[in-house]
Image (tube, rainbow, N blue to C red):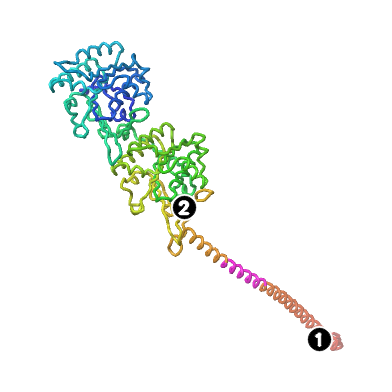
Amino acid sequence: MRAPPVIALAKAATGIAGFDEMTGGGLPHERTTLLMGGPGSGKTIFSLQFLAHGAQACREPGIFVAFEECADRIIANAESFGWNLGKLRPKRLYFLDAQPPSDLVHAGDFDLCAMLSGLAIQAADMGARRIVFDALDIVMALLPDAAARRREIYRLHEWLLERRLAGLITLKSGDDEAAAEKGGKFHFMQFMVDCAVILDHSVVQGASQRTLRVQKYRGSSFDENESPFLIGSSGFEVDVARPQWLPDADVPTERISSGVSRLDTMLDGGYYRGASILITGYSGTAKTTLSGAFAEAACARGERTMFVCFDSDSGEIIRNLASVDIRLARHVKNGRLRMVSARSIAGSGENYLVRIKTLAKEHRARCLVIDPVSTWYKSGTDLSTYSVAQRLIDWAKSEGITLLCTRLLDEMSGPAENGSPSQISTVVDTWIHLNYLVQAGERNRSLSIIKSRGTAHSNQVRELLLSNSGITLADTYTADGEVLMGTLRWAKERSAAAEAEADEASAELGRVKLDAEEAELEVRMKALQVELVAKQLEKALLARTTRGHASELSRGHQRMRELRGADASKAVLK
């Protein structure tokens, strides 16, 4: 038997960055959603953005029923978000003022039938697809008892279902989380509606934090975790982790320069594109300098880059880095580099994250520098800071942004390899540590690579040298098992060079003496060879002379014999 087809739930996009991702598309269409939150949590802004996005981007007219504030004040308060609500009135967005008069004297029973009848005519006339009942608890409080309140809420719910509208009802909740979970007098509504969203605005360790959680969503999967959000210049901005249903981000193998050629060599070619890099060190170890070198190299490649600094103003950063031949001003002028002084960003780590993501998207950044990210640790708990850092890295990877962060170490916190309370070092791809080495009254900088995933990186500790001609790394120099830097290294190198020069001179003198002795021996050998040849000639002459004398003597004797025996010989012959 063939299984019945799965029908996807129709959803109405809210236009709220992050929320549509965590719900898989937005609020349920033709169903009812309950939005609860305390004072200042952003219920009205959420509702207005839901309607404005529907009217502008989805061609779905909407109705806003205001039980607490008048329409003119609501529109005026929303002007800063750039939605242009006034231009949407009345054909695409209709506002109904339904606030009870302040001097209202309640006598007898009443219901919502008249209001709903008028809304039905208005919805049909403009073809409305969305409707918001803002602060319903205001009018429900006028009803005499819980039974009456329950009756009118069910009447409203049935009316929404009959009109097949995407309905959104907002209610005030208590100040504490338990009250928000229960929804106060109207907790039964959480069971009645198809979707329930809870907004929270609290102060943690002196820092304001806003969070959002989808409590239920019938017929749809959703992100159940609590997510921070920010009310920014364009409305709600929810910071969520990458949903599980989205595909994994691409894993590039391209290498990009760190801005320091010898560091690129130590990293087997540089950082990976889209990687997350952490540079740790104490104050003054050149964390900002290495960050500036990376930003300058990125801009030189033609990549749009954003540099976020928490410790100094942009002008100071540009001036200070120019002293080591890092010229950022020209890149700021041509628009490739955007310098952001984060001193103007206040609040929690979530606020920092959302603001930075918004600015990076506006700049279309491919490389992002945050100096230092440790500022976030002061604005929340270790757990929340780790969550913010992890979401930052996940977001950067999903966007293909190469992220470089610095972290200021506390000199009392112990070795850097022990990590930090937030454990951001465990989630980054490359971890570079900067340190001091104090010798002979000097403080010299050193650099080492603690880890670099997927890279055959150097394990040596190099001396980091800064000068008006730029940044470089010196080779490791050891003497008697000790690493030397600064003046001690210079003196030891000079001493070693002098010793080497003396040894070379001594060796040269020895070579000269040997050359002279060799020449003398060659002369002597030539003289002996000449003498040998003379002796050989003399010997040959003597031999020839001796043989000549012997032959001559033999012939003389023979002649004498012949002369003496001539007559006798002749007589005999006769």
Quadrant location of the N terminus in the rendered image: top left
**Is residue 425 rendered to the left or right of residue 569?**
left
Look at the image and say whether residue 365 sits in the magenta stretch: no
Q: Main secondary structure of the magenta part?
A: helix
Relative to residue 532, is residue 323 depicted above or below? above
Q: Secondary structure at mark 2?
A: strand
Q: Position of residue 178 (x, y in %)?
A: 19, 34
Q: Position of residue 437 (x, y in %)?
A: 42, 57
Q: Nearer the viewer, mark 1 or mark 2?
A: 2
Q: Where is mark 2, residue-wise? A: 464
Query: In the rendered structure, which amino acid carries the disc numbered 2?
Result: Leu
Q: Residue at x 39, y 42 (%)?
A: 276
Of residues 231 and 566, which is closer to you in this image?
Answer: 231
Relative to residue 326, is residue 482 depicted above or below? below
Of residues 574 and 345, which is closer to you in this image?
Answer: 345
Q: Residue at x 49, y 60 (%)?
A: 489
Q: Which residues are magenta?
A: 502-519
Q: Where is mark 1, residue-wise? A: 557
Look at the image and say whether residue 512 sits in the magenta stretch: yes
Residue lying farthest front? 103
Within 10 Å of disc 1 (Cα), the crowding (few <14, some 14-19, many 20+) is few
Q: Is residue 280 visible?
A: yes
The quarter holding residue 291 reads top left
Q: Position of residue 206 (x, y in %)?
A: 29, 40
* Mark sitting earlier along the chain (1/2): 2
Q: Is residue 25 visible?
A: no
Q: Position of residue 129 (x, y in %)?
A: 29, 17
